[in-house]
Image: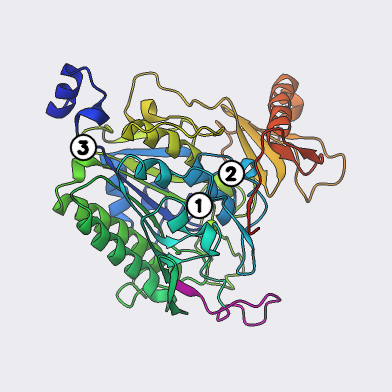
Amino acid sequence: MPTRRSFLGAALGLGAASAERKPNVVIIFTDDQGYGDVGCYGATGYRTPHLDRMATEGIRFTSFYSAACVCTPSRAALLTGCHPVRLGLGHRVLFPYSVTGLDPDEVTIADLLRAQGYATACVGKWHLGHLPKFLPTRQGFDAYYGVPYSNDMGSHHYPMIQYTSPPLPVMRNEEVIEQAPAQASLTARFTAEAVRWMEQNRDRPFFLYLAHCMPHVPIDASERFRGKTKHGLYGDVIEELDWSVGEILGSLRRLGLDEDTFVLFTSDNGPVVDAGNRRGYRSASAGPLRGMKNTTWEGGMRVPGIARWPGRIPAGRVSGEVVTAMDLLPTIARLAGAPLPANRIDGKDIWPILSGESGARSPHEAFFYYRDDRLEAVRAGQWKLHVFKPEWPAGHAPELYNLDGDIGESRNVAAEHPDVVRRLAALAEGAREDLGDAVSRRIGRNVRPIGRIP
Ligand code: MG
């Protein structure tokens, strides 16, 4: 049944967004949390009641993809709706010595929403360039509080590494206000900042991008969460992240904004599965998926994805449609009545799937798995073709997997389906043409330069 406000909007012949308060948008983004690292995705040994409830009150995706298998390109894609390779940001991650970043001329979700009158804040990890011209405050965010790159990139974590880096900075807007924060404090302090900021901005539409550092190494949790789970520190860290989700959702309820807010939870890439448990990572999990962070097997890029908006996203659904973090920008633009960027983007509006439109299907003909600037795989429907792996010998034939019956990519069926191999190989060739491919030394026709210091 339509809500009173959407009925009014319909009666006036207006889009919902123009007839009522534009919806708040909250993106909660964790770092290196695997497909199997949430209760409702099969985690055991610790609990995630808030995420599980968010899923039962909204929609849980089982084929939600990050656009890359490591931090920087994944974040660039989420915020711009563009494939990271298109932005010149396909290769690896930025470091404290990097002089590049997300080109400030690229349009982020924050840029789009700020132009629509939104208050915008980035809380937590940035990792799209730490020099002033690349900071969140130059990319559409009114406010920034957090660390400019990964939490392991301070001199305290890597004293012997070849590059020299300062102690991990904590920034407020464009100023360093602290160095080498206790890792155990990060989840709680980002949560407190996010809640405080939402309270301050409760009276106007807002966009909160809460990008936690955890569970990226070096992992740690607050005193009240340490030692509480059967899965060691990793379980404790995930329970604290889940607590954080509960704080955000609880705050929205308390502020009376529950039905005005689209909340999405996801992770930037797959988990670090450390068989030797050298870093306490034994229990990080990609669930049934093969591979891990920094690979283009499913475990590297298929991540948890949960969305909730009471009254607008029907409760209790699980969707296997292929959707990506790049879809957030065009979807949110639609919800806010904002125009899309003039530049080419890769994401698609997935509101029909989120809102439960009958028969809504994935808008993606294909999804491309790049690692750095190399095209390694393509998925179309149930099929996934791996076209390159650095560990393969020269001349290795492409491998085909049927993800419908073989989510763990265990049986190469290329020989049985030459027609499917040909079809997906043609799609891969289209990506090489458009985005380029370092394996075949191709420059894409439609790529844009990375942001640089002049
Ligand atoms: Mg990451």
The residues bearing labels 1 and 2 have C-alpha atoms spaced at a distance of 13 Å
Determine whether the beta carbon of the residue marked 1 sits less than 8 angstroms from the nearest atom of ligand 1: yes
Whether 61 is drawn above or below 277: the answer is: above
According to the picture, the residue beneath numbered tag 3 turns out to be 21
- Circle 3 — which element? loop
Whether 391 is drawn above or below 193: the answer is: above
Q: Amino acid at mark 3?
A: Arg
Magenta residues, start to end: 155-170
According to the picture, the residue beneath numbered tag 1 turns out to be 268
According to the picture, the residue beneath numbered tag 2 turns out to be 298
- Circle 2 — which element? helix
Residue 209: x and y in percent read 38, 53
Q: Amino acid at mark 1?
A: Asp
Residue at image location 46% in from the left, 45% down from the top: 108
* 164 relative position to 19: left or right: right
> Do the CB atoms of the residues marked 1 and 3 lie less than 8 Å apart?
no
Residue at image location 21% in from the left, 37% down from the top: 21
Tell us which disc is closer to us: 1 or 3.
3
Image quadrant in which you'd find residue 419: top right
Tell us which disc is closer to us: 3 or 2.
3
Determine whether the beta carbon of the residue marked 2 sits less than 8 angstroms from the nearest atom of ligand 1: no
Whether 162 is drawn above or below 214: the answer is: below
1 or 3: tag closer to the N-terminus: 3
Q: Amino acid at mark 2?
A: Glu
- Front position in the image: 205 or 359: 205
Residue 431: x and y in percent read 68, 32
3 or 2: tag closer to the N-terminus: 3
Q: Is 219 covered by the magenta stretch?
A: no
